[in-house]
């Protein structure tokens, strides 16, 4: 019975978050996108991004964000951000929606954000 429960738990947790694919890395973080949950709406792409931190930062080890990319202008806006005490979106969490006036950001050249946008925009 315990084995069946564990298998079901693993199945549903994987189904909930899908599969994270690493698209960029830096000295202090790895950046992932869940390609299974990308939604295309014209020039806009809605996607989930996970940042896995190399060390504890402000009580967080990872951050999962729901974002919108404008692939024509090549910019991004964060719609929701959830911080986790554990690696890869595990552990205690705290969620806060981003302010509706959250600014669009354009990535710096050769930045992790540039690599994430290229990945979700198909460049």
Image (spheres, grey):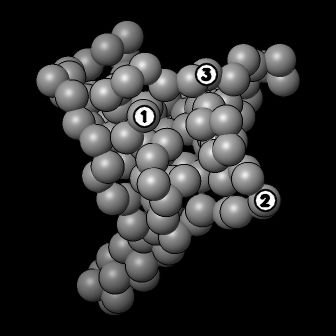
Residue picked out by circle 2? 42
Residue under the point 33% across and 76% down: 6
In the rendering, at what x and y percent does residue 4 appear? Answer: 35, 88
List the single residue furthest toward the left: 27
* Mark carried by residue 105: 3
Callout 3 crowding tier (Cα within 10 Å): few <14, some 14–19, many ≥20:
few
Does residue 5 show up?
no
Identify the element where label 3 is drawn: loop
Q: Residue, x 42% and y 34% (percent of image)? A: 114
- Dot 1: what SS? helix
Q: Observer-nearest residue: 50 or 39?
A: 39
Disc 2 to disc 1, C-alpha distance: 20 Å
Asked if residue 24 shows in the view, the reply is yes
- The residue beneath circle 1 is 114
Q: Which quadrant of the view contains residue 80?
A: top right
Please state which of residues 4 and 33 is positioned toward the viewer in this rendering: 33
**Camera-side residue of 70 and 66:** 70
């Amino acid at each position: 019975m315990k084995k069946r429960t564990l298998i079901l738990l693993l199945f549903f947790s994987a189904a909930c978050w899908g599969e994270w694919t690493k698209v960029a890395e830096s000295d202090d973080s790895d950046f992932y996108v869940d390609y299974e949950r990308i939604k295309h709406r014209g020039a806009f792409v809605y996607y989930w991004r996970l940042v896995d931190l190399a060390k504890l930062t402000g009580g967080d080890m990872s951050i999962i964000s729901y974002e919108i990319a404008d692939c024509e202008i090549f910019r991004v806006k964060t719609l929701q951000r959830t911080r986790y005490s554990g690696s890869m979106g595990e552990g205690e969490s705290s969620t806060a929606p981003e302010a509706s006036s959250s600014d669009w950001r354009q990535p710096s050249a050769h930045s992790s954000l540039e690599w994430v946008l290229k990945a979700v925009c198909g460049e």
